[in-house]
Amino acid sequence: MSNCPICSDLILRHIAENKVYWYCPSCHQKVPNLPSKPLVKLTQEDFLKQLNPTLKDLIYA
């Protein structure tokens, strides 16, 4: 299992529309599929671009 990059809680793998994605039950958000050993470090700005805009607004409210 992996941890949410936002809240550090465990994230769950889900399948919908023939696609696999990660979901954080604490944040109630889909989480980008981040490799455990990234080849390129993802900046916070790049990560936020992948988030749901509603969550981004909550983080910086």
Image: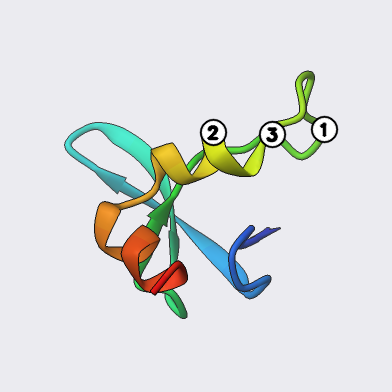
Which quarter of the figure has residue 34? top right
Q: Nearer the viewer, residue 29 or 60?
A: 60
Residue under the point 31% across and 46% down: 15
- Disc 1 target residue: 37
Which quarter of the figure has residue 19? top left
Give the distance between the C-alpha atoms of the residues marked 2 and 1, in whole angstroms: 17 Å
Q: Are marks 2 and 3 in contact (CB under 8 Å)?
A: no
Residue under the point 42% across and 76% down: 25
In the rendered image, the residue lying farthest to the left is 17
Q: Nearer the viewer, residue 41 or 34?
A: 41
The three-letter amino acid code for the residue at tag 2 is Asp
Circle 2: is it few (<14), some (14-19), or many (20+) Cα within 10 Å? Answer: few
Q: Secondary structure at mark 2?
A: helix
Q: Is residue 41 left or right of residue 57?
A: right
Residue 1 at x, y = what percent?
68, 58
Name the disc covering residue 46, or none.
2
Residue 15 vertical position relative to residue 5 in the rendered view, above or below: above
- Disc 3 target residue: 35
Give the distance between the C-alpha atoms of the residues marked 2 and 3, in whole angstroms: 15 Å
Q: Secondary structure at mark 1?
A: loop
Residue 18 at x, y = what percent?
24, 32
In the rendered image, the residue lying farthest to the top is 39
The three-letter amino acid code for the residue at tag 1 is Lys
Q: Are marks 1 and 3 in contact (CB under 8 Å)?
A: yes
Circle 3: is it few (<14), some (14-19), or many (20+) Cα within 10 Å? Answer: few
Residue 47 at x, y = what percent?
54, 41
Instruction: Please identify, in this view, whether the residue under mark 2 or under mark 3 is nearer the observer.
Output: 2
The three-letter amino acid code for the residue at tag 3 is Pro
Which quarter of the figure has residue 61? bottom left
